[in-house]
């Protein structure tokens, strides 16, 4: 399969790259359960939906399909597609009347979270959501440390905008001081709404 990014450069997705991605996914465990971080969030969202707690979904990729093969009448295989526009953040939804918009990122680093994991269009999107009083944040997963943090987007944006004059990553000491740590559970896997509640309580304080 060939994906064309917004800059026009094609990216070939063949069996070799597919196998490489599968091997990478297998090596990335979540809380020693062999679960990927994104999958854990998706399961958490399903839990929240099933229990009428919140409605949060992963945003679909903005793809424009240009070539499809039909090896079988009952099956279609996408052979070529374009990213119509850069994607924004991973998830959005509603919780207790609040609009939620957030990104999920992970790193193997132990001491900091690299700024290269975030892109200009994502930062701009977060800024726009905050201007509309949305609850905007990032979930940071340190896979080596098996630690998860809820970080308000305002702090991320502030440090990301100043990255040219500072380090190329956000130190874990800063994250520990300013973020809310999330303890993984069985159900939901990533109880991030507990962190959202704490965040809302902080904002409501005079």
Image: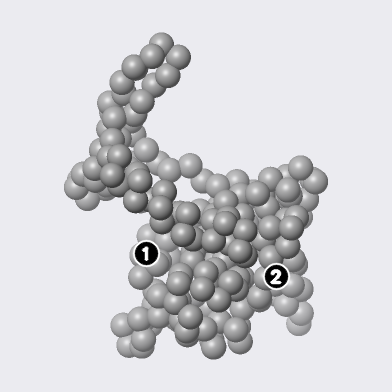
Q: Nearer the viewer, residue 166 or 126?
A: 166
Q: Nearer the viewer, residue 121 or 115?
A: 115
How many numbered marks does the figure carry?
2
Q: Nearer the viewer, residue 46 or 92?
A: 46
Q: Is residue 7 visible?
A: yes
- First in residue order: circle 2 vs circle 1: 1
Image point 57% across, 51% down: which residue?
39
Task: Give the class, few, some or many, for how many residues have Cα within 10 Å of label 2's Cα (few <14, many ≥20).
Answer: some
70 above or below 167?
above
Q: In the shown orientation, is residue 179 left or right of residue 105? A: right
54 above or below 75?
below
How far apart are the alpha carbons under marks 2 and 1? 27 Å
Image point 51% across, 73% down: which residue?
144
Model colouring: one colour
| Residue marked by disc 1 | 119
The local secondary structure at tag 1 comes to loop
Q: Is residue 94 visible?
A: no
> Which residue in the rendered view is the most extreme toward the left?
9
Q: Quadrant of residue 188?
A: bottom right
Which mark is on residue 139?
none
Picture quarter with the C terminus: bottom right
Task: Give the class, few, some or many, for how many residues have Cα within 10 Å of label 1's Cα (few <14, many ≥20).
Answer: few
Which mark is on residue 183?
2
Image point 58% across, 55% down: which residue?
35
The local secondary structure at tag 2 comes to loop
Image point 62% across, 58% down: which residue?
33
Measured as percent of width and height from the top left, residue 44 is found at 68, 53
92 above or below 69?
below
Measured as percent of width and height from the top left, residue 74 is found at 45, 14
Picture quarter with the N terminus: top left
């Amino acid at each position: 399969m060939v994906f064309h990014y917004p800059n026009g450069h094609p990216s070939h997705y063949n069996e070799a790259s597919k196998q490489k991605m599968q091997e990478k996914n297998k090596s990335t465990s979540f809380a020693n359960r062999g679960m990927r971080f994104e999958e854990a969030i998706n399961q958490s969202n399903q839990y929240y939906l099933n229990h009428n707690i919140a409605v949060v979904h992963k945003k679909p990729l903005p793809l424009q399909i240009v070539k499809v093969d039909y090896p079988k009448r009952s099956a279609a295989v996408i052979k070529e597609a374009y990213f119509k526009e850069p994607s924004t953040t991973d998830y959005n939804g509603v919780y207790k009347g609040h609009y939620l918009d957030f990104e999920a990122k992970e790193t193997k680093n132990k001491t900091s979270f690299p700024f290269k994991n975030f892109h200009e269009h994502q930062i701009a999107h977060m800024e726009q959501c905050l201007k509309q009083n949305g609850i905007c944040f990032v979930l940071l997963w340190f896979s080596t440390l098996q630690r998860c943090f809820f970080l308000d987007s305002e702090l991320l944006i502030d440090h990301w905008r100043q990255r040219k004059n500072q380090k190329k990553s956000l130190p874990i000491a800063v994250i520990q001081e300013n973020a809310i740590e999330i303890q993984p559970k069985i159900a939901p896997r990533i109880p991030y709404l507990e962190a959202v509640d704490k965040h809302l309580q902080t904002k409501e304080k005079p």
